[in-house]
Image: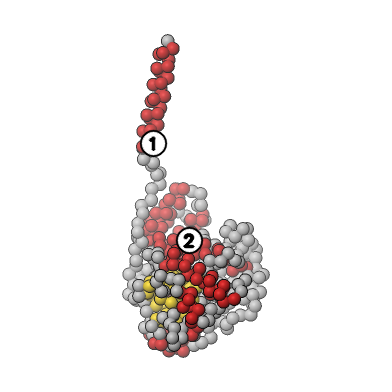
Amino acid sequence: MKKIILYAALTVVVSLIVNGCERDKLPIIDPYPVEIFEPASPQKSNDMKLYVHYMPWFETPETNGGAWGQHWTMANKNPNNMDENGKREVAAHYYPLIGPYASGDKDALEYHLLLMKYSGIDGLLVDWYGTRDLYDYPAVKRNTEVLMDVAGKVGLELAIVYEDQTLRAEMEGTDEKMAQAQADMKYLEANFFNKSNYIKVDGKPLLLVFGPQEISSPDNWSTILSVLNTKPSFLALYGHSGATNSAATKNAQGEYIWVDATSMDTKYAAKDNFELFMGGAYPGFHDFYKEGGWGESVLSSIDYADGATFRNLLNMAKSNHVDMLQLITWNDFGEGTMIEPTEEFGYSFLSELQTFSGISYNTPVLEDIYKYYVLKKQYPNNLKVQSALSQAFYYFISLQQDKARSILDEYKVN
């Protein structure tokens, strides 16, 4: 009797083992599958390369240890204060359509980059502070890394604008500053220049310097760039290539335009002096520094003129036959140069850009992308909805925007 019971018990154990092994081999069924598509490039009738200057420095309490980042607060504003409509108090004259956000928020990045794609923008020029563990530099570094990944998924390019002024703080002597700059260049080469969607000009990685403002010797720039295996296509700020080049030393191939008091006619007159020259267009200028307690305004306000300022500068770039144009900026709310949609301007600057780039899309697709972002935030823990929105994302990046809209139409925004 004992043998029979033991045999039966062993049979049950073996059966469980065998069945368990078979279950391990069964495929995992995803209840909400998503079809993956590669990004597609929209057709444009204007072949000028359009790059937008991007600030990756915004933080919210969720990403910044419970405190709002300084670029939303400056010295005296508190975004925790809200009006009767839920609008937060931020250090800017203009308010982002999605409200203040974190630059590392992938939902916000997808929203930004999809808007760019459907406005005819080819890539981003990212303001970058280097690799030091000081102030908000690590956050800017981290956010730029996330941005690079999302840009690749969306099908946009990216290049770095190096802020050499960050070498001033807590550094003694030129040698220490140059060693740090070399470390920053090595990091860029290892982590950015080798990416397939990093912007290349003449087969070399594009690198801009905002100035230079700290390293002002051409020989020193030669030393800094010498650590790179491939010398970049290097551009200095308008009027600053004398700090990178001399009669005997050429580091920068050219210059790029920025918003300042010098007339645009004067800037474009220098175009033929350089091997490479990047034009510039901005919607206007109205900084918040004085109101925000960050000192006096750096430049007199430039009127937005209901979009005419931006439109005229876009056309000026076209008439000067530049190959590359920097849009100044996507999101510098502190200086009021943003073309990102705002409560005050809506999508007007992106609509101007759609016309200028010769892309076939218009405002309704931009509104769809806004709805995509709102739904992402409205249903954060709903797996079914998030999977559907992921499918919409892949439709958007592959230019199947009608299919994306069909998904969005299934959900109502609160």
User: Which residue is most to the top?
Assistant: 1
Residue 343 shows in this picture = no
What secondary structure is marked by label 2?
helix
Q: Residue at x 47, y 67 (%)?
A: 186
- Which amino acid is tagged 2? Val
Residue 213 shows in this picture = yes
Query: Between residues 3 and 250, which one lies in front from this camera angle?
Result: 250
Q: CA separation, marks 1 and 2?
A: 35 Å
* Above or below, comparing residue 263 to residue 51 in the picture: below
> Within 10 angstroms of label 2, few (less than 14), some, or many (20 or more) residues?
some
What secondary structure is marked by label 1?
helix
Res. 169 image quadrant: bottom right
Residue 224 place in picture, x, y as percent: 48, 74
Res. 354 image quadrant: bottom left
> Within 10 angstroms of label 1, few (less than 14), some, or many (20 or more) residues?
few
Q: Residue at x 36, y 77 (%)?
A: 48
Query: Between residues 383 and 256, which one lies in front from this camera angle?
Result: 256
- Which amino acid is tagged 1? Asp
Q: Of the residues under marks 1 and 2, which one precedes in the sequence?
A: 1
Q: Residue at x 41, y 74 (%)?
A: 232
Disc 1 and disc 2 in contact, CB within 8 angstroms: no
**In the drawing, what numbered circle is on residue 24?**
1
- The residue at which mark 2 appears reads as 146
Residue 152 place in picture, x, y as percent: 40, 62
Q: Residue at x 50, y 73 (%)?
A: 162
